[in-house]
Image (cartoon, helix red, strand yellow):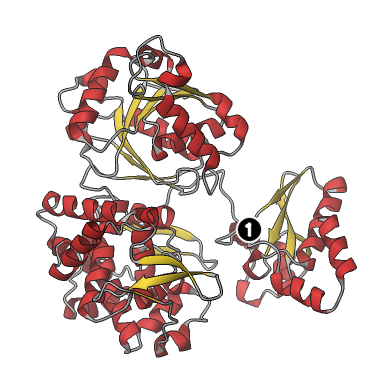
Amino acid sequence: MAVSIRKAAVIGAGTMGSGIAALLAGVGIETLLLDIPARDTEPGDAPLKRNAFVHEGLKRLQNARPPQLLSVSDLDLIRAGNIEDDFDRLAGVDWVIEVVVENLDVKRDLMAKLAQVVSPRTILSTNTSGLPIRAIAEGMGDDFTRRFLGTHFFNPPRYLRLLEVIPHPDTDPEIVATVVRFATERLGKGVVLAKDEPNFIGNRFMSITLSQLVNYALDHGFTVDEVDALTGPLIGRPRTATFRLHDLIGIDIAIHVARNLYPAIPDDPARHVLRHPKADALYDRLLQNKWLGSKTGQGFYEQVRGADGAREFWSLDLETLDYQPPSQPRFHSVNIHRKVEDTGQRIRLLLDEDDRAARLLWHHLAFYLAYASHRVPEIADTIVNVDNAQKWGFGHELGPFEIWDALGVAATIPRFEEAGYPVAEWVRQMVASGHATFYRRDEHGQTTGYYSPQHSSYVSPEEDSRAITAEMLRAQTMTGATSPATVTESERRASAGEVARNAGASVLDMGDGVALLEFHSAQNSIDADVLEMTWKAFDLLQHDFDALVIGNDGERFSVGANLFMVLMTAQAGQYDDWNARVKSS
């Protein structure tokens, strides 16, 4: 049953629901946003009063930081309503996304009502972070269940790329394909297919791995600052690391998710990390004090004003529950390896050390990687879906199986198991059959296959014909070189279609009359070389190309102006030169 999604509806105008509505409107989809009618109102009251909950959600959208709207004009595509007066309007939409409270009975009741009013072609999905999809669909009838599935957008929907799509056994595969295609091509999401298992992929890993880290910190006397210094960018994760991530999520939410997960996974041998006496006591104190993280102004961190009036983040002493001034943790292993550029190599070198930091990282990553092996194919059919869920949902540079490849699979299996972290049988079989890595890559580092436990061999990755990276472009144009190792830098550039280059940026020929302006300055910062090459690209666009794409393969498109360059210009008194550069850009 092919469905074209032109109109949508979101039920629930909270932070997540309104964010999803903004995302849909931002790509041109007319969206009906519904919530319960305002208290103390009746049918016939003024719509602005009657739909107050939705209008409050839309107001939050306009004031959100970072911005949730692509453009304020997107609000013109969002129609406000309520589930009493406007429920019949749902008959005219192609996709209904329910985003109400995480309560099974509430969701089932709403779905039963939806089944009575929507078109037979309407796709229905429940946005949930862990409720069983099959339980919501149970007893709803074949016509409903074949076009019903779960979705799990990550908050904020505009910025976090991950979308978990969770079909149940009776979902029509064509409906799944329609949602995946729409989410990928129109919404720009990275979609992973998750099985209908507790907390799916993202939140299952989040609860288990964060719990293991907190437990280890409490058992071995680590401070909040030390753990976050070790589990952030050092190992390819965001600066929120571990304890800041708790504060960002909301400590009450993190506790609720973890404690609900424990009874839901009785057969998971690792579930014991969710109930640790020291951690339980700590979390109970935080709940009692209402120290719930960023939303209450304090949690594992508290924002204070220093003696000079500057903003500081003081961290919680995990034993006394007093806040301590920020510290700069120092570890020998980190000092000697932190500047290693390649993340996988940096992690491997860190784990080869033997100080407190290395031991924490060793036990965390050994637990994490071994745990990941046991979750395939339980919660996801492929290692790719597990890795992508971590990267797209939580901003990790590498997924667990990518990290494992960097460490060396065969070499680490006995070390993991000796330390009490048994790996899945299929991993041992993989290595024994001569498959040394989880991913197969070519000489340019491009993935050509990934190991499938179900097939006991490598399978080809699904390719998106619309996707291209600068590295892929260079690799493709290098194909055919007799000996890539002997190609000179100038020859490599020429074969890669590099039209112009300086230290900060390049212009490459993408074919079909399209040029690519690629930044490759430090952190893709904007400096004089980037500005010079930008003007060169514009000049080439006038004569040699029909279109120009500005992009790069960096984690961040650009960190902005090169502040060191600004400082040097200021110290040299070259204000006229700098003003001219700003004006020209």
Q: Position of residue 162 (x, y in %)?
A: 42, 48
**Residue drawn at x 20%, y 68% as measured from the top left:** 423
- Could you classify mark 1 by the number of other residues whose Cα lies within 10 Å: few (under 14), some (14-19), or many (20 or more)? many
Q: Position of residue 83 (x, y in %)?
A: 34, 19
Mark 1 lies on residue: 552
Q: Position of residue 123 (x, y in %)?
A: 36, 24
Q: Is residue 456 visible?
A: no
Q: Total label count?
A: 1
Q: Residue 103's quadrant in the figure?
A: top left
Q: Is residue 38 left or right of residue 486?
A: left
Q: Is residue 369 left or right of residue 60?
A: left
Q: Residue 141's quadrant in the figure?
A: top left
Q: As rendered, which of 274 and 183 lies closer to the eye?
A: 274
Q: Position of residue 208 (x, y in %)?
A: 24, 61
Task: Check disc 1 and report its element: helix, strand or loop.
Answer: loop
Which amino acid does the dot numbered 1 rest on?
A: Asn
Q: As drawn, which residue projects farthest toward the top? A: 44
Q: Quadrant of the N terminus?
A: top left
Q: As rendered, which of 81 and 288 lies closer to the eye?
A: 288
Q: Quadrant of the C terminus?
A: bottom right
Q: As rendered, which of 27 and 484 lies closer to the eye?
A: 27
Q: Is residue 22 visible?
A: yes
Q: Is residue 70 left or right of residue 7?
A: right
**Residue drawn at x 56%, y 75% as measured from the top left:** 308
**Residue drawn at x 78%, y 77% as measured from the top left:** 568
Q: As drawn, which residue projects farthest toward the right? A: 576
Q: Residue 9's quadrant in the figure?
A: top left
